[in-house]
Amino acid sequence: MSRRLAALAGTAYTHRKAMLAGWVGALVVAIALAGALGGEFSVDYSTPGSQSRAAAQVLESDFAGRSPETVDVVWETQGADDAKLDAFLAKAATLKGIAAAPKAADATVSPDGKVAIARLQLAERAPNVPKATGKELLDMRDQIRAQGTKLELGGEVIQTAQQGPISSEAVGLTIAAIILLISLGTVVAAGLPLLLALFGLGIATSLIGLLTAVIDTPDWSVTLAAMLGIGVGIDYALLILTRHRAALQNGASVQEAVVEAVSTAGRSVLVAGTTVVISLLGLFAMGLSYLYGVAIAAILAVLVVMAGALTLFPALLGLAGRKIERLKVPLVHHTDTDSPRAARWSAAVQRRPWPAAIAGTVILLALAAPVFGLWLGFPDAGNDRTSTTTRKAYDLVSTHFGAGSNGPLMVVVPEDRAGDVAGKLKTDSGIANVSDPQTAGGHALILATPKTSPQATVTRDTLDRLRDGRLGAGVLIGGRTAEAVDQAQTTKTRLPLFIGVVVGLSLLLLLVAFRSVVVAIKAAIMNMLSVGAAYGVVAVLAQGGTFGKLVGIDTETPVPPFIPVIMFAVLFGLSMDYEVFLLSRVREEYEKCGDTSEAVNRGLARTARVITSAAAIMVVVFGALALSPEVFLKLIGCGLATAVFVDATVVRLVLVPAAMQLLGDRNWWMPGWLDRIIPRAERELEPVRAA
C-alpha cells in the first residue's frame, strides 16, 4: 500500500499543475451538472411497514392530494373580519403545495368561542412544500395583523420558513482558519488544508444536488455532509502536512517530503476515511428511506476529501514548495518536532496506568449517565421559541381547544365500518373529540383528537390501546403523532443491528490494518464510550434548563429518533480516525524499537500536536451547528463536538496510553488461525521516499 501511495504522490507532484487543473475542472463540471440535472430536496419521514405509513398511502390514493399534514391558521374571533379572513384563505389556496382552504365561516371555533382554526390542506408532505410558500404565508400574516386581526400560523411549513439564514459552514471555516494559523504558524501552511476543504465542499455539495434527482434527500443533509467533509478534509490534510514539514526539517527535498508524507500519513488517511464510510453505510441497516439520502450525501463528502487529500493535496504541497514557511504569523512559534509536554504526560500516565484508566472511565461513564433519560420523539411547535408564530398558534390551540388538538390522530377505516369505529372512538377514555367521517374511494377518514398533547406519554398509551385490536380489523391510524411513535419504536428495534453492523465491519478493517485482535477490540470499546458520552450530553441539552438555553433550547424537547443513529455512524468513524492516527505511529515506533511502552510514549509525543489541532478544528466545525435554527442540527452538532473533544483528550491522552501500558506486548496479539484468514495490508517499516 505504501509503495502505491508513494507512486501516486510522485505522480501528483510531477504533474502538479495538471492535477490542480483537473480538480478545478472537476469542480466546474460538478457545479454545471448540478445546475442542469439536479433535482429538488424531498423527504418522507414515515416509517416503512408501519400503520402510519399505510394510512398515509391510503390518503394519497383515495383522498386525492391529501397529505397527513396541514398549515393551521389560528385567529382570535373578537374583532375578526370574515371578509378579510376569506381573502387571506382564498389567496393561501393558490400557493404552491396548498391543496385546499376552507372559508372563514367553516372554521372550527373553540368551545369558549374565543379562537377559530382553519386547516390548509397540503397537496404533499410538508418537507416537500416550497419554502417560498411558507414565506409568502408569513408575509400575508403580517399584513392581516396590521389590519387588526390577531392571527397566527402553525405547521411544519411555517416552522421551516421562519428559520433564519445563519451559515454554520461559514462560521466553522472561519474559526478553523484561526486555529490552523495558530497551530501551523504560517499563512501558506494554514491555507492549504482550507483550500482542500473548499474544493471538497464545492464538489460534494454539487454531487448532492445530482443525488436529489435520484433519491429522496432531506435539505439538511447538505449541512451535515458539508460540516463532516470540512472537518475530515482539514484533519487529513493536517496529518499529511505535519509529516511533510517534518521531512523537510530533516533535510528531505520537497519531492521526497511529499512522497514520504503520503506514503506514511496517507495510509492512515485511507484507513480512517474507509472507517468513516463503513460507519455511514451502516445507516442502511435502519431501513428508513430518508436516511439513505443522508448516508450517501455524507459518504460523497468523505470520499471527495479523501481523494483530494491523496491527489490534490500533494500537488498543492509541490506548488508551495519551500514557500510553505512564508508569511509567518506574528507571536506564534511553530515547530514540528516531538512534543516534550506530551511525552512527559504519557510517561506520567504510564507510570500509574490503573488510576489513569479508572479515572478516564469514570469521567466517560459520568458523561454518559444522562442517556437513560433520553426521550425519543419529534419536536413540535410546542418546543419552538415563545416569540415565533408557530409557538403562539400552538399555545392558542392548546389553551382553547385542548392539548391534543395540536396532534389529531388520522383514523382510516373501510367506508362501511365508519359509523362503528367512530362510535368506539367516542367512548375511549383518551379521546376528547371525534370528527364526522369523510369518505372517498371506499375508505373513511376520521380525525380523533386526544385529550393530551402529542408528546405526552398518555397519548402514546392511547394510540397503543386503539391499535391493539379494539377498533377491529382494517383500521389504520396515522398522522404526525402516530408517525413519531412508529419511528421511535422502529429505531429502538433496529438500533442493535445497526450498531452490530458498524462495529463488526470496523473491527474487520482494524484487524487488516494493525494485525491485532486486542487493538481492534480496545478501539471499539473506547469509541463506544465516546459515543455514550455524546448521547449523555444530547440528553442534557434536550432537557432545556440552564445548559439547553445556552444553545437556544428553551423547553424540554424530544430527540428525533434519527439523531442517535446518525451520531453513532459519524462518531464511530471519526473516533476511529484518531485511533488510527495514533496507533499507526505507535505501531511504526514499535517496529523500530520493539518495546511497547517506549513506542506508546514516542507515538503519543509525535501525534499529540496534530491530533489536538485536528480535534480543535473538528470541535468548532461541529460546534458551529449550535447556531442552526433547527433543533435537531443543534443537538447533532453539540453531541459531535463533545464526543470529539472527549475522544481527543480523555480517550487518546489517558485511556489509550494507560490501557496499552497495562497490556504490554499483548497489544499485538493475533491468533495464528485468524492471521491466516484475514487479508494482509502491505506494511512499510521505513517511509518511502522518491528516488
Image (cartoon, rainbow, N blue to C red):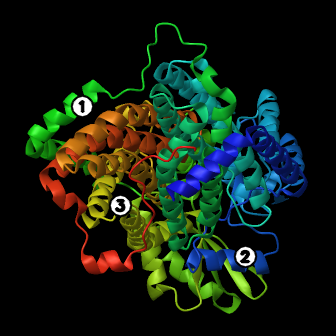
Image spot of residue 339 (x, y percent): 31, 27
Secondary-structure class at tag 3: helix
Q: Horizontally, is 665 left or right of 42 in the view?
A: left
Q: CA distance from mark 1 to mark 2?
A: 66 Å
Estimate the spatial distance between the alpha carbons at disc 3 and disc 1, rounded to whole Å: 23 Å
Q: Quadrant of residue 524?
A: bottom left
Q: Which residue has dot 3 on it?
A: 514
Q: Is residue 510 left or right of residue 422?
A: left
> Mark 1 or mark 2, which has the lower sequence index?
2
Which is nearer the N-term, disc 3 or disc 1?
A: 1
Amino acid found under the numbered disc labelled 1: Ala
Local secondary structure at mark 1? helix
- Viewer-side label of 2, 3: 3
Instruction: In the rendered structure, find residue 252 and report the number of the disc placed on it.
Output: none
Q: Could you say whether the residue bearing mark 2 is in a helix, strand or loop?
A: helix
Q: Which mark is residue 343?
A: 1
Q: Against 334, is 331 above or below?
A: above
Q: CA distance from mark 2 to mark 3?
A: 54 Å
Q: Which mark is residue 59?
A: 2
